[in-house]
Amino acid sequence: MTTDTDIELSGAFQARDGNGRTLDVKAIRIFDEGYGIIDVYVDFKTQLDPGAYKDTVLTGQIVERLRTLGYHGPDFGPSDPGLQESKTIVLEAPEEFAAFAKSRGWKNLAEEFDE
């Protein structure tokens, strides 16, 4: 479900979950602008098990993928349970992620108020 307000950070790759299953990731994306905290959307080809966004093995591999693309910083945490979907998990990036996101075209709308 990519729109013209998305920035794709990674295309397709494979990741393993905590049960050892290989999952096909379609893309990792963020919205092109926001205020401070960035939600990272990870789209999968098939339906996920309930609670997949809390699987630390899976989320660790997603963060490692981002690190190979230039992100330097701590691991991500799960985002709001209400944002999770059957084929998409949403992770909350730490503040350190903003520099990487900016390098990919993200705009921090909160900076307009930093004066």
Image: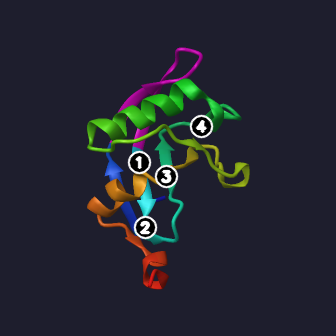
Q: Few, some or many C-alpha atoms within 10 Å of disc 4 (few <14, some 14-19, many ≥20)?
A: few
Q: Residue 5 at x, y = what percent?
A: 41, 71
Q: Few, some or many C-alpha atoms within 10 Å of disc 2 (few <14, some 14-19, many ≥20)?
A: few
Give the Cα distance between marks 1 and 2: 13 Å
Q: Do the residues under discs 3 and 1 have CB atoms within 8 angstroms?
A: yes
Coloration of the structure image: rainbow
Give the Cα distance between marks 4 and 3: 18 Å
Residue 13 in view here:
yes
Residue type for callout 2: Thr
Picture mark count? 4
Q: Kindly identify which residue carries mark 1.
A: 28
Q: Few, some or many C-alpha atoms within 10 Å of disc 1 (few <14, some 14-19, many ≥20)?
A: many
Q: Do the residues under discs 1 and 2 have CB atoms within 8 angstroms?
A: no
Q: Residue at x 38, y 32 (%)?
A: 64
Quarter of the figure that contains the C terminus: bottom left
Compared to 18, does 115 lie above or below? Answer: below
Give the Cα distance between marks 3 and 1: 7 Å
Q: Kindly identify which residue carries mark 3.
A: 40
Element carrying mark 2: loop
Q: Residue at x 35, y 41 (%)?
A: 66
Q: Kindly identify which residue carries mark 4.
A: 47
Magenta-drawn segment: 12-26
Give the Cα distance between marks 2 and 3: 14 Å
